[in-house]
Image (cartoon, grey):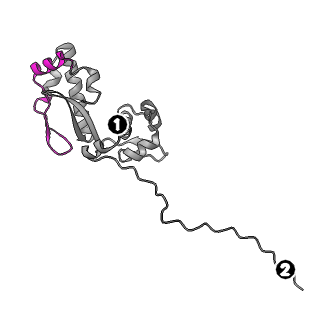
């Protein structure tokens, strides 16, 4: 009689996925100020940090890990939210693209005080940062030469409307004397 063939025990098969299985929710970047302000405060803060990480990588040539550490955010959170602004190199590192179209909510001086403006893109955000720097230079030193180039500059918000930059020196002096345009207040959210 031929020897019996040994059979291996079979592994139990996985049960079919239930229809109520939880799907991993994709994190989407806010594309409008309405979407941004609908986010919980913690999610808004994470978004702001992710955008700052991208800007720091671009400006200082820092790695994603280094820039993320500087802003206290996980690099995976940055990739999940602002990955469109990153490019993966052949060696596997992430670098910031030369510019992006990410939404940023910035605080700028307005005729009645500080106001928030939502812009799309690193180029517009950079111009607004230059403007804020020019305002601070004027308030500290009285040198208004940097403000001249913003008198006729047309910047657009996320909806395509023109952003009115205050360049009237008397108005800026008035707002500065009232403490509205301190360096700290420009980098916090307008109330």
- Quarter of the image with the N terminus in it: bottom right
In the rendering, at what x and y percent does residue 184 appear? 29, 22
Q: Which mark is residue 137?
A: none
Q: Are marks 1 and 2 in contact (CB under 8 Å)?
A: no
Residue for badge 2: 4
**SS assignment at label 1:** helix
Q: Which mark is residue 48?
A: 1
Q: Mark 1 or 2 closer to N-term? A: 2
63, 73: nearer the viewer: 73
In the rendering, at what x and y percent does residue 153 appear? 13, 34
Q: CA distance from mark 1 to mark 2?
A: 69 Å
**Is residue 78 left or right of 101 when viewed as pictured?**
right
Q: Is residue 159 magenta?
A: yes
Which region of the structure is painted magenta? Answer: 150-179
Mark 2, residues whose alpha carbon is within 10 Å: few (<14), some, or many (≥20)? few
The vertical placement of 13 against 131, above or below, is below
In the rendering, at what x and y percent does residue 115 appear? 20, 31
12, 173: nearer the viewer: 12
């Amino acid at each position: 009689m031929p020897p019996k063939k040994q059979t291996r025990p079979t592994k139990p098969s996985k049960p079919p996925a239930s229809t109520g299985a939880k799907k991993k929710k994709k994190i989407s970047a806010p594309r409008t100020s309405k979407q941004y302000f609908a986010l919980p405060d913690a999610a808004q803060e994470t978004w702001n940090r992710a955008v700052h990480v991208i800007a720091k990588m671009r400006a200082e040539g820092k790695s994603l890990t280094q820039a993320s550490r500087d802003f206290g955010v996980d690099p995976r959170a940055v990739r999940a939210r602002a990955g469109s602004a990153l490019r993966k190199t052949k060696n596997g590192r992430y670098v910031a693209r030369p510019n992006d179209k990410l939404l940023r909510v910035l605080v700028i001086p307005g005729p009645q005080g500080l106001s928030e403006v939502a812009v799309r893109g690193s180029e517009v955000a950079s111009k607004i940062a230059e403007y804020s720097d020019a305002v601070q230079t004027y308030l500290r030193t009285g040198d208004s030469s940097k403000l001249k180039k913003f008198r006729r500059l047309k910047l657009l918000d996320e909806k395509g409307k023109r952003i009115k930059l205050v360049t009237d020196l008397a108005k800026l002096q008035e707002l500065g004397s009232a403490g509205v345009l301190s360096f700290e207040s420009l980098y916090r959210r307008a109330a």
